[in-house]
Image (spheres, rainbow, N blue to C red):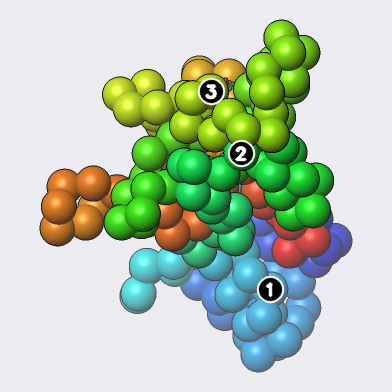
């Protein structure tokens, strides 16, 4: 977040004189309290200044990257979920390749006839099967997919930062967002990918 010249002046005044009331900040800038109100609101909402009733404003002392980290920690995966591309486990490798092209995704999530999450099939899994000469027109994806207990996923209320860490640690491009079913299995509700993380990163510059 880029601070305006006046906001920078306010931060300096509060840094050197805090805690200080809004009235006193206004006096030092030869402005009215009302004129400063939007600036003070921005500075407190962004966490740069803190306000205590009857005491005044003081500088939070948090470095900018800590403020961004504090904000990012609030993000929950379900608020950033994208559409998951889900296929049945008996789909042929050929059809899975067509689906991955048509849907323009890097990973398919595989389910059984009850809708239980069974596996993940990525571009490279499909490429590998094609390269080693499998009969891609008859062989189903469940033969080549990554399956339980090796699947990584996140629950709807988990944090975006947890998903990002998991993708880096496991060296994978995306994660299904799941809910637990009554039968103890998981249902795929959404998808979070490295693209999701890039979009969030870019959005921070547009706020
Ligand atoms: P690719 O290498 O095809 O670009 P990934 O890096 O996502 O795509 O996948 C690498 C390997 O990890 C593949 O074998 C894939 O099946 C597996 N994989 C991808 N996503 C997951 C996941 N969420 N859980 C477990 N394994 C996964």
Above or below, 7 against 165 in this view is below
Q: Is the residue marked by circle 1 packed among few (<14), some (14-19), or many (20+) residues within 10 Å?
A: some
Q: Which residue is mark 1?
A: 39
Secondary structure of the residue carrying numbered label 1: helix
Residue 160: x and y in percent read: 49, 45
Image-based side of 23 in relation to 137, left or right? left
Q: Residue at x 59, y 53 (%)?
A: 85
Q: Residue at x 58, y 19 (%)?
A: 171
C-alpha span from label 2 to label 1: 59 Å
Residue 104: x and y in percent read: 78, 49
Q: Quarter-wise, where is residue 43 in the image? A: bottom right
Residue 126: x and y in percent read: 68, 26
Mark 3 close to ligand 1, CB under 8 Å: no
First of labels 1, 3 by sequence position: 1
First of labels 2, 3 by sequence position: 2
Q: Which residue is mark 3?
A: 144
Q: Quarter-wise, where is residue 168 in the image? A: top right
Q: Which residue is mark 2?
A: 92
Image-based side of 7 in relation to 86, left or right? right
Among all residues in the image, which is located at the extreme top?
132
Among all residues in the image, which is located at the extreme right?
5
First of labels 2, 1 by sequence position: 1
Does the CB distance between marks 2 and 1 fall below 8 Å? Answer: no
Q: Residue at x 56, y 44 (%)?
A: 91
Pick the front one: 144 or 6: 144
C-alpha span from label 2 to label 3: 10 Å
Pick the front one: 70 or 7: 70
Above or below, 53 against 81 in this view is below
């Amino acid at each position: 977040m880029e601070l305006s010249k006046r906001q920078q002046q306010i931060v300096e005044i509060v840094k050197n004189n805090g805690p200080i009331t809004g009235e006193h900040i206004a006096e030092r800038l030869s402005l009215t309290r009302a004129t400063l109100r939007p600036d003070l609101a921005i500075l407190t909402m962004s966490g740069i200044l803190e306000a205590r009733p009857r005491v005044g404003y003081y500088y939070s002392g948090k470095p900018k990257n800590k403020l961004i980290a504090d904000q990012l920690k609030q993000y929950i995966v379900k608020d950033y979920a994208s559409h998951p591309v889900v296929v049945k486990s008996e789909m042929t490798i050929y059809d899975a390749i067509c689906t991955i092209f048509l849907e323009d995704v890097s990973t398919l999530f595989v389910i059984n006839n009850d809708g239980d999450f069974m596996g993940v099939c990525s571009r490279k899994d499909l490429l590998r099967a094609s390269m080693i000469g499998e009969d891609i027109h008859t062989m189903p994806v469940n033969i080549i997919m990554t399956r339980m207990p090796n699947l990584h996923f996140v629950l709807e209320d988990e944090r975006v930062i947890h998903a990002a860490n998991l993708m880096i640690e496991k060296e994978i491009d995306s994660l299904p967002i799941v809910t637990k079913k009554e039968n103890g299995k998981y249902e795929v509700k959404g998808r979070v990918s490295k693209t999701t993380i890039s979009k969030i990163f870019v959005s921070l510059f547009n706020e």
